[in-house]
Image (tube, rainbow, N blue to C red):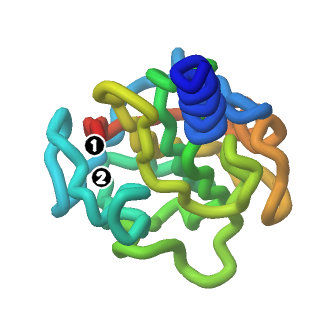
Amino acid sequence: MRLRLLLWVTVLLGTAACGGAENGKEPAVTAPSSITVTSPAFRDGETIPRKYTCDGEGVPPPLAWKDIPANAGALALVVDDPDAPRGTFTHWVVLDLEGTTASLAQGGVPPGVKQAKNSGGKTGYYGPCPPSGTHHYRFTVYALSGPTGIPDGAGLDDALKAIDAKTIARGRLTALYSR
């Protein structure tokens, strides 16, 4: 009985950690992948340092990108986990960065930049926190034809649809994490 209860609680907590009620679908999967995304904290395909996860400080890592199309009117950033038990879990959505922005410093976004709700229902960065196994965390930068017009704190689905509708190019950095 205790084992069954422990298993049920583990499944319930794992579902809450990665796979909330509002699971985002990856936007603009057919857009050209011409943007190069990097981080001084980790390389593509490597483990993200603990500092940037739920087991550490939970702050966003520093990111940089290049090869943004000249006609980009805005940028967006989506961090998601396609390995979550109940479908893709979106950890962070940053909207309407200036089209000339080339990086984000560790810890967050510039003043005035909008963020949508993540799959956990909160606005802001939700660090990697897989319930089991090794998960892939995709840091995708989208070049947009113009600002989304989505307000700060908007719902996840609305934000992802707006990004999808305006994407002209994209690029990705993928990190791994397991607990």
State which quarter of the image contains the C terminus.
top left
Residue 28 makes an appearance in the image: no
- The reply to whether callout 2 and callout 1 are in contact (CB within 8 Å) is yes
Q: Residue at x 32, y 25 (%)?
A: 133
Residue 82 drawn above or below residue 20: above
What residue sits right under mark 2 in the picture? 66
Q: How many marks?
A: 2
Among numbered discs 2 and 1, the one appearing first in the sequence? 1
What residue type is disc 2 on?
Lys
Q: Residues within 10 Å of mark 2 (few under 14, many from 20)?
A: some
Residue 161 drawn above or below residue 156: above
Q: Residues within 10 Å of mark 1 (few under 14, many from 20)?
A: some
Residue 63 drawn above or below residue 119: below
Q: Residue at x 65, y 57 (%)?
A: 95
Residue 137 makes an appearance in the image: yes
What residue sits right under mark 1 in the picture? 36
Q: Residue at x 42, y 37 (%)?
A: 130
